[in-house]
Image (cartoon, rainbow, N blue to C red):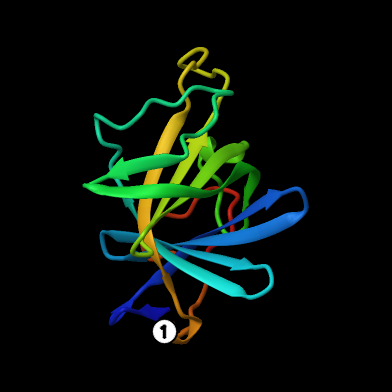
Amino acid sequence: MQFDGRDWVVENRLVYEEDGFRWLEYLLCDGPDRGWLSVEEDDWLELGWYRPVPMPADFPRFRPGVALPPSLRWEGQDYSLREHGRAQLTASLRAMPQQASEVCRYGDYEAADGSLLALELWERGGGRSGPRTDPEAELAVGRRIEPALLSLLPGDGRSVYRPEVAGSPSG
């Protein structure tokens, strides 16, 4: 796929489902750079381009069962909660990373200038590290984009960034 003057390779497709509504996220790679293309179709097609960012040390801590805050401040900008919920996640191109094999809580935030902030909380109940009290949090910043800004290119289905995973399709 071409976007923003760069060639991006689709490395994974995640399908989120909540109460019968589905949306897709594509992990795109260009060398060491990663981005997420979010695709939602409700009454119209809505695309978002996100880049993962490290969770700041002073960012709020999130607890299971506690509501997400109505607003968040990130890098000097205020974001308001516009949508939140719990979604089941499946991957359709690659073996799922372990944290992505369960339900996640999500919060979609928006700033006054239209900038987007996506928060995902992975609540897992144990495993090798024992029970968790804090969910693992992932943060991404982004913006809405027009579909006409994307060009789709053919590929052969093989990853150029990951070694083959046993039992997964080569793609």
> Residue 85: x percent and y percent?
62, 42
Please indicate whether residue 101 sits to the left or right of residue 140 in the image: right
* Quadrant containing the N terminus in the rendered view: bottom left
Residue 102, above or below 5: above
**Which quadrant would residue 44 be assigned to in this image?**
bottom right
Residue placed farthest to the left in the image?
76
Quadrant in which residue 163 is drawn? bottom left
In the depicted view, which residue is nearer to us: 82 or 148? 82
Residue 128 showing in the rendered view: yes
Query: Seen in the image, is 72 located left or right of residue 43?
Result: left
Along the viewing direction, whichever of 136 and 160 lies nearer the viewer: 136
Q: Amino acid at mark 1?
A: Leu
Between 59 and 100, the one nearer to me in the picture? 59
Position in image of residue 27 (x %, y %): 45, 60
Viewer-proximal residue, 23 or 155? 23
Residue at position x 78%, y 53% in the image: 20
Residue lying furthest right: 20
Image coordinates for residue 118, horizontal then vertical, percent = 44, 50
Along the horizontal axis of the image, is 83 left or right of 33? right
Q: Which residue is mark 1?
A: 149
Q: Residue placed at 48% from the left, 26% from the top?
A: 135
Characterize the local packing of mark 1: few (<14), some (14-19) or many (20 or more) Cα atoms within 10 angstroms.
Answer: few
Query: Is 126 above or below relative to 11?
Result: above
Element type where label 1 sits in the image? helix
Query: What's the residue at 42%, 35% (across, down)?
Result: 137
- Going 55% across and 71% down the picture, which residue do you hit? 46
